[in-house]
Image: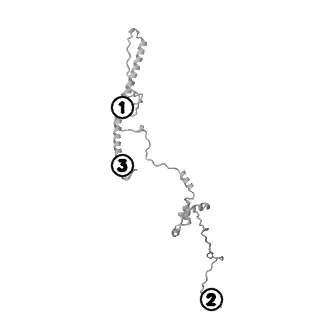
Amino acid sequence: EKDKEKKLDDDSTGTTVPQSAFLGPTLWDKTLPYDGDTFQLEYMDLEEFLSENGIPPSPNQHEHSPHQSGLQQATSASPSVMDLSSRASTSVHPGMVSQNCMQSPVRPANRNTPSPIDPETIQVPVGYEPDPADLALSSIPGQEMFDPRKRKFSEEELKPQPMIKKARKVFIPDDLKDDKYWARRRKNNMAAKRSRDARRLKENQIAIRASFLEKENSALRQEVADLRKELGKCKNVLAKYEARHGPL
C-alpha cells in the first residue's frame, strides 16, 4: 500500500526520474587497469593522417557565410580540425611546392643599364661651317659635295707619301719628234695632271676633315670636363650618404 501511495504521489507531481536510453552497462562503472610499464601513448602526425586518408585541403575556409563568424570567434581558443587541415595542407606535399617554384619562370631583374648606343649615331654639336670655296676644291666635279662630318679615311690613305723625284729630262732632236712622240707626250702629260689633281683633291679633303675633327675634339674635351665635374659632385654626395647611412 505504501508503494502504491508513493507511486500515486509521483504521478500527481509529474516528476519522473530520467533514465538512459542505452541498455548496456555504463562505461564509468568499468575501470581500466593501469600499468606504468605497459601503458604507452602513441603520437599521430596530422600531416601523415591527412595524406594517408586522402583528405584534400580546404581552400574555401575563408569563404564561409557571415553568420558563421560568431561560431568561429567562440571556438577560436581551441583550433578546429578544419584549421589544422588547412595549415597542414601547405606542408602535405612539399616536393610539389618546391617543384612548382623551380618550374615557375624566372623574371629578369630590372636593370638600370642603358641599351648600347652605336657610336656612329652620336652627333656632337660643333660650330663648324667650312668655306664653300674649300668644299668646292675638295669635291669631285659632277659628284656630291664633300662632307667633312661623314667622310672617313683609312690608315692607308693617311700614311705619309714619299717624295717623288722628277725624271731627268732627255734631249731629243727635232727630227725625231714625230707623231708617235707627240702622242706619247700628250698621254704622259694628261696622266701626270690627273695624278696631281687627285693628290691635291685628297690633300684638300684631309685638311678640311682635320679642321672639323679639331673642332669636334675641342667640343668633346669640354663635354668630358663638364661630365667629370658632375661626376665629382655625385661622388661627394655618395660618400656623404655612405658615411651617414652605410654603404649601398
In this rendering, which labeled residue sits more in front, label 2 or label 3?
A: 3
Residue, far front = 37
Front-most of 8 and 19?
19
Indicate which label's residue lies in the foreground, 2 or 1: 2
Q: Which mark is residue 6?
A: 2
The quadrant where residue 85 appears:
bottom right
Give the residue number, with chain letter if any, for mark 3: 239
Gap between marks 2 and 1 measured at Cα = 137 Å
- SS type, badge 3: helix
In the image: residue 62, left or right of residue 212: right
Give me the residue at 41% from left, 14% from top: 182
Indicate the amino acid at tag 1: Ala
Q: Along the polypeptide, which appears first: circle 3 or circle 1?
A: 1
| Residue ID for mark 1 | 210
Kindly tell me whether residue 59 is visible in this rendering: no
Q: Nearer the viewer, residue 71 or 51?
A: 51
